[in-house]
Amino acid sequence: MANPDLPFFHFMDNQTARPVLVVRALSKSFGGIKALDKVEFTLNGGEVHALMGENGAGKSTLMKILMGLETADSGEIMLAGKSWENHGVRDALDRGISMIHQELQVVPELTVAENIFLGRESTRWLPGWLDDRSIYQTTKQLLTDLGVALDAHTRMKYLSVAEMQMVEIAKAISYDARVIIMDEPTSALSEKEVAALFGIIKDLKAKGVSIIYISHKMEEIAQIADTVTVLRDGKYVGTKPAAELDQSTLITMMVGRTIDSLFPEATAEKGEVVLSVKNLSIPGKFQDISFDLRAGEVLGLAGLMGAGRTEVARAIFGLDPLAEGEIFIKSEKTTIRSPEDAIRHGIGYVSEDRKAWGCVPGMSVLHTMTLSSLRDHLRGGFIDAGSEKAAASRMATDLHIKTAGLSQQVLQLSGGNQQKVLIGKTLLAEPEIIIFDEPTRGIDIGAKHEIYKLIRQLTAQGIAVLLISSELPEVLGLCDRVLVLAEGRQTAVLSGQTISQEKIMNHAIQR
C-alpha cells in the first residue's frame, strides 16, 4: 500500500482540479542519443491524460523516469507542488504512483493473488508466516469490484494474455495509487473487457485518481481522455483538450506531416482461389470452419477475444494439429503438419505476439529476417553470409526499417520496427498467402499506415491476405470480405456494403 503520511495524499484530497504532477524541461540521453529533450508534462487530479507519439517518441522513457526505473539527466519533477527526486520504484509506489506495463510483468508459476501481492504479502502471528486467507480474500474482492471473473487461486501460466492484463490492472489498483500509468492497457483485451476497463477508469476519476494513458488507438483516446500531450522524437509538441482534437490534427502533431488517408484505396484485382479450407475443427477451440481466399484479396477474420481466430490461423500454418477438415492450395488437397510444410506450400504467418512467437531473444535483425528462408542462402551445405546479408539489407530498405544496423538485436527496436522485421522475415520466404494476426498491435499511427500501404502493395502483386484484427476500423478499412466467428463457430461472411461495425458485432456475439 502507498504511504498515507506522505504529502501527495494530503494534496489530492478535494483538489482534483489542481496539478498533482508536473514535469519541467526533463532530458535523458542514452549513449549520446537524446531520448527526451526538455519535455514538459502536467497531470491534474482526477484527469485522464493521454500521452501520444510514435514509437521512439520518448513516452516509455518518460514513464520509466516517473516510476524510478530510469534517472533523468536534467529537469525537474514536481509532485504535490514540491520538487521530487525519485529514488526508485519503491519510492514511486509509496508516493501513490503505479504503472501497468505494456509488457506483462507476471510470475507464471504463482497464483493470481500471489502475483498481485508479490513483495507485500500479509503476515500473521510470527514474522515469516504468510496470511494466505487475507491475501486471497482481498484479491477476490478486488477482482469482483473490477468485474473480472477469475479464480484468485489460478496460476498465471493458465491464463490468457487478456486475463493476465486484467490481473496487472488489478495489481496497479491494489496499491491504492493516486496516479496510475496505463501503457497500452487494452492491447490484448476484448471489446467487453475494454468497456469494463473504461468503467473502472471512470470510477477512479470520480475518486480523484489521475490516469496517464498511453495508447495508439485513436478511438480510445476520443472516448476516454480529457487531455492529450504529444511527444515527437523526444521533444514536447503540445498539449490540448481531447475535445478540441480531431484525428487528422492529432496525426499531424504525432508524425509531423499529414496522412491523407489512413487506409489506402484497394486497387488489386481478385484472382483465383489460392486457399480453401473445408470443415476445419479442433475440439474446444473451433469447429466446422470453411472459407475460400483469392489472390489479391484481404479476407478478415473477426470476432471477440476467445472466438477462435488465432487458433484457426495457427492450425492453417501447422502450429496446431487439426482434428478434422481439409486444406486446399490452388485446388490441390494439402497436408500441413508443421510451419515448414506451410512455408513450403507458400503460406506465411505474422504472429500476434511478436516477442513470444516471432523473435528469438538476442538474435539480430539480420538473422531474424532470414530465419524462414535460410535454404535460399545455402551453398554446398553452408550459409552464404554475403547472400544472406544482401537479402536482409534489401528487405530492410524496402520496408524502411529504422535500425542501427543489421547486427542490432531485434528486441532493441521500437515495436513498429520489430513488426516490420517479422514481416520482412515472412516476405523473404516469398509466400503467396500471408496470415497477419494483429499486425498493428502496440505500434504507432505512422507505422500502422506503412503496414496498411504494404498490405495494399502485396495484394496488388497478387498475394492473398488473411487478416485477424481486434480493431474494427482496421477490419472495415482493409478487408474485401469478413468472416465472423463466435465461440469457435463461423456465424457470417460479410462483403461489400454488408460490412459494418454493427453487423460484425451482432454476428460476433453468440445469442
Image (spheres, rainbow, N blue to C red):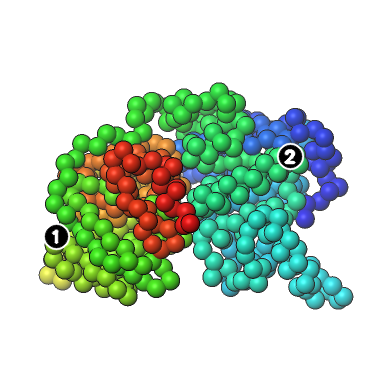
Task: Give the quarter of the figure containing the N terminus.
Answer: bottom right
The residue sitting at 23% across, 69% down in the picture is 326
The residue sitting at 23% across, 56% down in the picture is 292
- Report whether 480 appears left or right of 441: left
In this view, the residue in front, 470 or 396, is 470
Task: Answer above or below: position of 291 versus 284.
Answer: above
- Report whether 340 appears left or right of 303: left
The residue sitting at 17% across, 62% down in the picture is 329
Q: Quadrant of residue 340?
A: bottom left
Can see residue 203? Answer: yes
In this view, the residue in front, 243 or 511, is 511
What's under tag 1, amino acid-wise? Answer: Lys
Place of residue 314 in the rendered image (x, y in percent of width and height, measured from the top left) = 34, 64
Place of residue 424 in the rendered image (x, y in percent of width and height, measured from the top left) = 28, 51
Query: Along the polypeptide, which appears first: circle 2 or circle 1?
Result: 2
Contact (Cβ within 8 Å) of mark 2 with mark 1: no
Task: Answer above or below: position of 195 versus 357.
Answer: above
Question: Whole-Å distance between the Cαs marked 2 and 1?
Answer: 58 Å
Which numbered marker is on residue 498?
Answer: none
Can see residue 474? Answer: no
Q: Residues within 10 Å of mark 2 (few under 14, many from 20)?
A: few
- Report whether 63 appears left or right of 325: right
The residue sitting at 87% across, 75% down in the picture is 125
Which numbered marker is on residue 330?
Answer: 1
In this view, the residue in front, 407 or 440, is 440
Place of residue 328 in the rendered image (x, y in percent of width and height, measured from the top left) = 18, 64
Q: Residues within 10 Å of mark 1 (few under 14, many from 20)?
A: some
What's under tag 2, amino acid-wise? Answer: Ala
- Report whether 12 appears left or right of 268: right
Task: List the residue tagged with mark 2.
Answer: 206
Place of residue 483 in the rendered image (x, y in percent of width and height, measured from the top left) = 33, 52
Which structural element holds mark 2? helix
